[in-house]
Image (cartoon, rainbow, N blue to C red):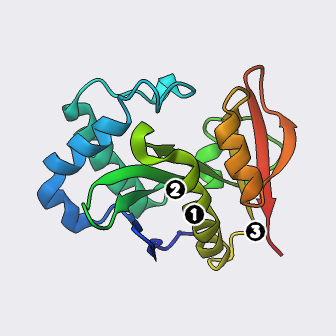
Amino acid sequence: MMLEPIHIEHADLLVHSFRAEEIKGIESVAEQVYGILSDEDTLRFLPEKRLSSVDDAETFLKGSLLNFHSGKNYLHFISNRKSEKIIGMIDVIPPETAMQYYQLEHYPYFIEFYLKANAGRKQVMSLVLPLFIEKVKQQRIRELAAITNRDNIGAQKVLLRSGFGFRGSFDSLQDFYTISFN
């Protein structure tokens, strides 16, 4: 099942998918994404997501746009509505893509999120994630999962406040959280 693009406007925040028309300004978008995916504090628990250049960010974005339209993953931006600057990202990974990376008995949709260190992480994700989850739920997705580094207490709190439940250890460093919808 293909996920429809999610659009949320709340307070000073805008959540939207990476749209084809943004290719025109991809250099600016790539610089903003690089600012997130190269930041030491942002990636403290996700060093494997680090990009090494703006060119890498542009390649990442082009791949994300293709992946969105082929159903491999669904990248969404969190932007400040006033400045129009990207302050974070939410990525939804469908079961078919998760199967390529994980060995599980059951494959839900997975969610990953990244926020710029100076974006007020807890407040932003505490506002946005429940709204995002509601939009996902409206698309008849039955379950979302998230994996967090065991030391990332902030992400764990945001997930729990948003309705996720702790399901157990995922591996030696990470824990597994899920939320189910009827």
Task: Name the residue: 46% across, 27% down.
Answer: 41
Q: Residue 121, how many percent across, how many down?
A: 52, 46
Q: Are marks 2 and 1 in contact (CB under 8 Å)?
A: yes
Q: CA distance from mark 3 to mark 1?
A: 22 Å
Asked if residue 116 can be seen in this view, the reply is: no
Q: Nearer the viewer, mark 3 or mark 2?
A: 2
Q: Which residue is located at x 26 percent, y 44 percent?
A: 32
Quadrant of the image occupied by residue 155: top right
* Residue 38, image x, y percentages: 35, 28
Amino acid type indicated by mark 3: Arg
Q: In the image, residue 152 lies at what x, y percent?
A: 66, 32
Picture coordinates of residue 123, whole percent (x, y) = 56, 54
Pick whichever of labels 3 and 2 is earlier in the sequence: 2
* Residue type at numbered disc 2: Val
Q: Please give the residue where the numbered disc 2 appears in the rendered image.
A: 124
In whole angstroms, how far apart are the C-alphas of marks 3 and 2? Answer: 25 Å
Tell me if mark 2 has few (under 14), some (14-19) or many (20+) residues whose alpha carbon lies within 10 angstroms of its own. Answer: some
Left or right of residue 150, residue 3 in this image? left
Which residue is farthest bottom? Answer: 138
- The residue at which mark 1 appears reads as 127
Disc sitting over residue 142 in the figure: 3
Of 66 and 117, which appears nearest the observer?
117
